[in-house]
Amino acid sequence: MIGGFDMKGHIDSQLGSISIDSEVIAKYAGSTAVECFGIVGMAAVSMKDGLVKLLKGDSLTRGINVVVDDENKLEIDFHVIVAYGVSISTVADNLIENVKYKVQEFTGFEIKKINIYVEGVRVID
């Protein structure tokens, strides 16, 4: 499922409870991802005709799926379009490292897994 969100993350403390919606996590992860070298943007794949569409602005989260498990561990799927001529493995490693660090700092939740699906390649002008 592309652009899906499952559950909310919860932090309980002596002062109260904090609930973080997985869509908030997806927005933050998406904005971090598009800052990474070699990432052109998030992608949406049409189920009807299989065409890949580059997502802009607020629709970035349609290319991201976040699942929060019972232990507040995150699994994040990214459907991305990469720049032509880059090393996909280098770009993917960089995306994983940046997102893992920044999302863990932002939420306090551990990242269990990050999956990257390269849906297309674009020449950057």
Image (spheres, rainbow, N blue to C red):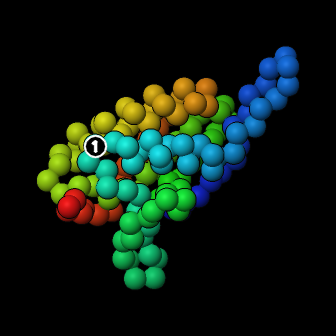
Q: Residue at x 17, y 49 (%)?
A: 86
Query: Element under label 1?
Result: loop
The answer to whether 83 appears left or right of 57 in the picture is left
Crowd class of label 1 (few under 14; some 14 to 19; many from 20; radius 10 Å):
some
The answer to whether 112 appears left or right of 82 in the picture is right
Q: Give above or below for 17 relative to 79.
A: above
Q: Residue at x 37, y 43 (%)?
A: 35
Is residue 118 visible in the rendered image? The answer is no
Q: Which residue is mark 1?
A: 37
Q: Position of residue 8 (x, y in %)?
A: 71, 43
Q: Position of residue 102 (x, y in %)?
A: 48, 31
The answer to whether 32 appears left or right of 89 in the picture is right
Residue type at the position of mark 1: Phe
Q: Residue furthest front?
A: 125
Q: Residue furthest right?
A: 15
* Quadrant in which the C terminus is drawn: bottom left
Residue 15's image quarter?
top right
